[in-house]
Image: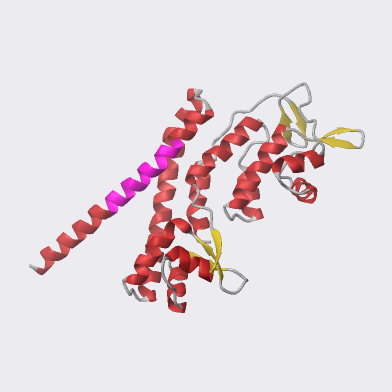
């Protein structure tokens, strides 16, 4: 959905630079314990992360997880594999393609510990858009609280609130945006206006996200990383940062609209 574009900048915000650890190297990945931590079979690993064995092996073949520790013909997996697969599953749940996931994981050093990989997953959640829900048309109308014509559906698609699926009358829906989309419909706004407005907001939103990302990355993240705070404290701070920046953006937009109105009045008088 369109929220993928809006979350790309968020992904870069939560890609911290992690310190390196000493340990043994397995095909570019470093394990930090001298005592082997890898004790699970591929079947046990798949069960632990809620995937099939075939899927785990596929991801291993794509280099998304380090190779297993080998004892003869047997391979054993551990916490690092769990952490990386759980991060893959989290990204998939937010609608990211395999290539996008590979690009994100490339930014995580092979030296990262399981705890550091898990921190990526923890920090990711506050910045991601709501997970889309798949609803058929009756369920969508029930959620909207009103019948929806074909024109209404087109408007919601134009606004990026819903996206068609290959199945007839089944849609991917952004739940948090549905109520706003219905309000736009009730204004009888022409779809051309909706498309033009959405383009403006998308472009402005991406620009703001890029600049806020740079501020976070260069002015705050190094301090957080060096502070030695526990991961849960860092997560709490990040969770507060997002709503604060959104509220600041809303306030700035409201002020700009008011100023634009005043300027328009001054020009007419």
| Residue at the image position 24 percent from the left and 55 percent from the top | 256
Is 83 on the left-hand or right-hand side of 234? right
Q: Position of residue 159 (x, y in %)?
A: 43, 66
Magenta range is 238-253
Q: Is residue 28 visible?
A: yes
Q: Position of residue 82 (x, y in %)?
A: 70, 37
Is 15 on the left-hand or right-hand side of 47? left
Q: Is 234 placed above or below 186 here?
A: above
| Residue at the image position 46 percent from the left and 38 percent from the top | 217
Closer to the camera, 205 or 121? 121
| Residue at the image position 82 percent from the left and 37 percent from the top | 41
Q: Quadrant of the C terminus?
A: bottom left
Type of secondary structure dominating the magenta stretch: helix
Q: Position of residue 184 (x, y in %)?
A: 35, 68
74 magenta-colored: no
Q: Is 21 placed above or below 170 here?
A: above
Q: Is 196 placed above or below 101 here?
A: below
Q: Quadrant of residue 238?
A: top left
Q: Residue furthest right?
A: 72
């Amino acid at each position: 959905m369109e929220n993928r574009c809006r979350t790309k900048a968020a992904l870069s915000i939560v890609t911290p630079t992690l310190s390196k650890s000493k340990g043994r190297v397995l095909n570019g990945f470093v394990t930090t314990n001298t005592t082997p931590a890898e004790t699970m079979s591929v079947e046990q690993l798949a069960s632990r992360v809620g995937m099939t064995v075939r899927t785990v092996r596929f991801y291993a073949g794509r280099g998304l997880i380090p190779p297993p520790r080998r004892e003869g013909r047997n391979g054993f997996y551990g916490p690092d594999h769990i952490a990386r697969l759980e991060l893959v599953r989290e990204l998939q749940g937010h609608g990211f393609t395999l290539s996008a996931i590979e690009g994100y994981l490339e930014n995580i050093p092979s030296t990262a510990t399981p705890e550091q990989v898990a921190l990526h997953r923890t920090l990711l959640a506050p910045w991601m858009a709501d997970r889309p829900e798949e609803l058929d048309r009756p369920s969508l109308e029930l959620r909207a609280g009103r019948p929806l014509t074909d024109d209404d559906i087109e408007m919601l698609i134009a606004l990026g609130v819903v996206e068609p699926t290959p199945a007839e009358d089944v849609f991917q829906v952004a739940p948090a945006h549905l109520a706003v989309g219905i309000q736009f419909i009730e204004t009888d706004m022409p779809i051309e206006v909706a498309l033009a407005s959405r383009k403006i907001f998308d472009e402005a939103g991406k620009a703001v996200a890029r600049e806020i990302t740079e501020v976070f990355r260069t002015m705050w993240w190094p301090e957080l990383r060096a502070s030695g705070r526990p991961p849960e404290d860092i997560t709490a701070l990040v969770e507060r940062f997002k709503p604060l920046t959104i509220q600041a953006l809303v306030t700035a937009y409201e002020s700009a609209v008011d100023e634009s109105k005043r300027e328009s009045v001054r020009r007419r008088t």
